[in-house]
Amino acid sequence: MAVTDRLAEEPDNTAVRVALWRALHVDVDAPPHVFEDQVGLRLVAPDEGWRQRPDMDPDATSRFRAAIVARARFIEDLVTEQATRGVDQYVILGAGLDTFTQRRPEIGARLRVFEIEQPETQAWKRRRLVELGYPIPDWLRLVPVDFEAGQSWWEQLVAAGFEPNRPAVIASTGVTMYLTKEATAAMLRQIAGLATGSTLAMTFLLPAELLDDTDRAGLETSAKGAQASGTPFVSFYTPQEMLAMARETGFREVGHVAGAALGERYFAGRSDGLRPSSGEDVLLATS
C-alpha cells in the first residue's frame, strides 16, 4: 500500500469527534433538535461501542455538544439566507467531515460549494462518500490543501473554479485556535479582499478567564487532548481583539456573536435545559 493510501485510512480526530457529537445530539438530546446530521455518523462508521467513549459521555459533553450543533445551525442558516439573496458561492475553510451538500442538496444545488481541507482527511472523505453511494455533484468542489507543505489555500481555491469577483459566503469553524495570530490575520486579509457583499463567519476561542467557571475544566481537557494529538491550541482572542483584527485587515462591517446569543437563539425554552458551553464565539464580517 502506498504511503498516501495509508494516510487516507483515517480522518482527522477532531473532524471525527465533531461528526459524532452532531449525531449524538439526535440520539440522546430531546427534540426539537437544533441540528440533525446522521450522515456524518455514516461516514465515520464507528465501532459499536462508540457511545461509551469518554469524549462521548452524554452528560459530561452536553454543553460542548450543544455548542457544536449551535455553530453548525448558525452557519447553515446564514448560508441559506445568503443563497436566497443571490449569493452563489460557499467556501468551507477546514471542512472536516461537513455534510451540508449531502443533507441540503436543495440549497447546495443553487451554489458552488468549495470544501477546503487537508489532503488526507479529504481523500478519506471522498472515498467514504463513494462507498456510501453519495454522488459528488459538479457544484461541489473538494479542494485539498496541504497547509503543512506551505500550499496556498487561495491559489488552490481559485484553481478549483472559485470566482473572486463574485460575492461568497466563507465559513471557518474550529480552525483559528490551531493557527498563529499572524496566519489568521493573513487569512482575514485575503477574505476581506473578496467581492463586495461577501460574508465571513469564523469561530474563535476565548481566553480561559472569559469562560464560565463550569466550562474552564472542559477547555483545559480539550487543550490537553489537542496537545497530545499533535495539534495544540495556539491562539485565543477576546471579542475586542478579534473585531479589531477584522477591521485592520480590511473588512467593511464587523460583528460579534457570543456563544450565549446562540444559546438564546436556538435553545430557549427547552425542557432539558440544554445550553451551549461558553468559550467559542463567532466573528461575522462583511467585505
Image (cartoon, rainbow, N blue to C red):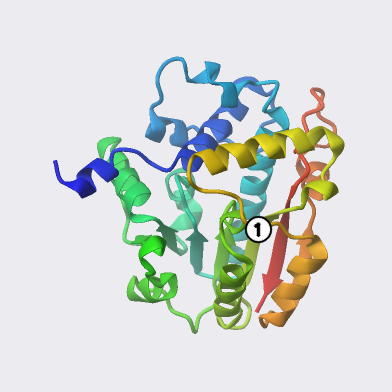
The image quarter in which residue 238 lies: bottom right
Judging depth in this view, the residue of 115 and 78 nearest the camera is 115
Picture layout, residue 24 above or below residue 281 = above
Give the residue drawn at x 77%, y 29%.
Answer: 274
Judging depth in this view, the residue of 183 and 224 nearest the camera is 224
Give amino acid for label 1: Ser
Give the residue drawn at x 40%, y 71%.
Answer: 157
Res 253 visible: yes
Horizontal side of residue 48 vs 276, given as left or right: left
Give the residue drawn at x 85%, y 32%.
Answer: 269
Res 35 visible: no
Judging depth in this view, the residue of 183 and 155 nearest the camera is 183
Horizontal side of residue 61 vs 96, given as left or right: right
Picture layout, residue 280 above or below residue 212 = below
Picture layout, residue 80 above or below residue 224 = below
Picture layout, residue 51 above or below residue 207 = above
Q: Position of residue 135 (x, y in %)?
A: 30, 47
The image quarter in which residue 159 lies: bottom left
Q: Position of residue 175 (x, y in %)?
A: 57, 55
The tally of labels here is 1
User: Secondary structure beneath disc 1?
Assistant: loop
Q: Position of residue 268 (x, y in %)?
A: 83, 37
Give the residue drawn at x 46%, y 39%.
Answer: 13
Position of the C terminus by quadrant = bottom right
Q: Which residue is mark 1?
A: 235
Q: Position of residue 219 (x, y in %)?
A: 70, 39
Position of the N terminus by quadrant = top left
Horizontal side of residue 149 vs 166, given as left or right: left
